Amino acid sequence: MSPARQTGYRLLGRRFDYLLHTRPAEWPIVAAHTTVGYLLSVGLRGALSGERLGPALLGVLLWVVCLNGGTLALNSAFDRDEGDIAYLHQPPPPPAHLAGFGFALMSAGLAASLLLPVAYRLVYAACLVLSVLYSVPPLRLKAVPGADWVINMLGFGTLTPFAGWAATGFPVDTAGLLLLLGFCPLFAALYPLTQIYQYEEDARRGDRTLARALGLRRSLIVAAASAGLAFALFGGAAVAAGWRSADGWRWVALGLAALAWAFVLLPWVKRYAVMGTREHQRGMYRALLAWAITDFVVVVTWGS
């Protein structure tokens, strides 16, 4: 048990299990991706001046802690994982009221979203419904290969940065729309990679995940194709934004982000058959790094 986890149990007792199942280790990643939408909406100069900062901070907080944290708690309540899961090593057994806790957390965020623009409220409510459909029986779309993929590519890929944008109240222009849509196939690339290292455990439980439905090789090929589509949309956004020859550094930065994905995926496709669970898990975290690089490049190139 890590020192942080020991401290949590000393302070909260077994109630700390509820917090652990919201997976705080993922919060910075979700916060960063939500903040991308805010930075794209106001630009880097607007962000430095604090333009619409208050609504944006509230929007990010509700999205990350209430919606995302509540969704993960709800998901854990029905998954009952025994091995490591994304952003939570050695998860404790789900507490008795974890599902209710997760739904209450999401509902509290929905109530607080009344303080923000209508577009934010609508996208929050839509994702809350998707979260319930994804996690809760009898539908439990997480166990329907393909449906789980679509929900995640929409929810995390596009709607998460859109929430950061919507919190400001600014409308989305054509270039911004293409950028937000580009994150949809980019998360379509990431999603099967988060399942590959759990492939054997999912098989033992009989869970029909996307990675199991496709198989390891096809999962990786689909991920590579989806990443390619994402960067095609980013290129379309660059054209819509009017990038010229003087913007060569922007094109170079976008190309470097694409290379980061290639460095993750191409060796993985080549070596997947001889890789163990830990290696697949490291591959997932390298893909998360490629995602972070892409977020950074998008913000710098379009926000400047």
Image: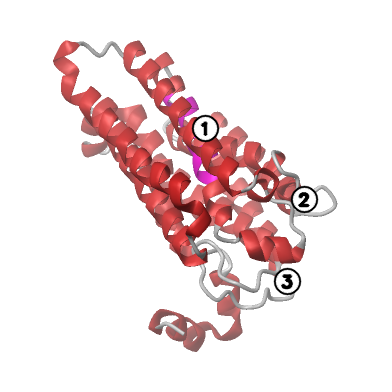
Above or below, comparing residue 146 to residue 231 in the picture: below
Q: Residue 288 in the image: x percent, y percent?
A: 41, 50
**CA separation in Å, label 3 and label 2:** 18 Å
Q: Which residue is mark 2?
A: 140
Which secondary structure class fits the magenta region best?
Answer: helix
> For residue 304: magenta?
no
- Please state which amino acid type lies under the numbered disc 2: Arg
- What's drawn in magenta, residue-wise? 179-191
- Does residue 47 appear to the left or right of 194 in the view shown? left
Which of the two residues, 177 or 116, is positioned nearer the viewer here? Answer: 177
For disc 1, the neighbor class at 10 Å (few under 14, some 14 to 19, many from 20) is: many
Which of the two residues, 57 or 290, is positioned nearer the viewer here? Answer: 290
Q: Quadrant of residue 44?
A: top left
Above or below, comparing residue 144 to residue 74 in the picture: above
Q: Which residue is mark 1?
A: 184
Mark number, residue 97: 3
> For residue 184: magenta?
yes
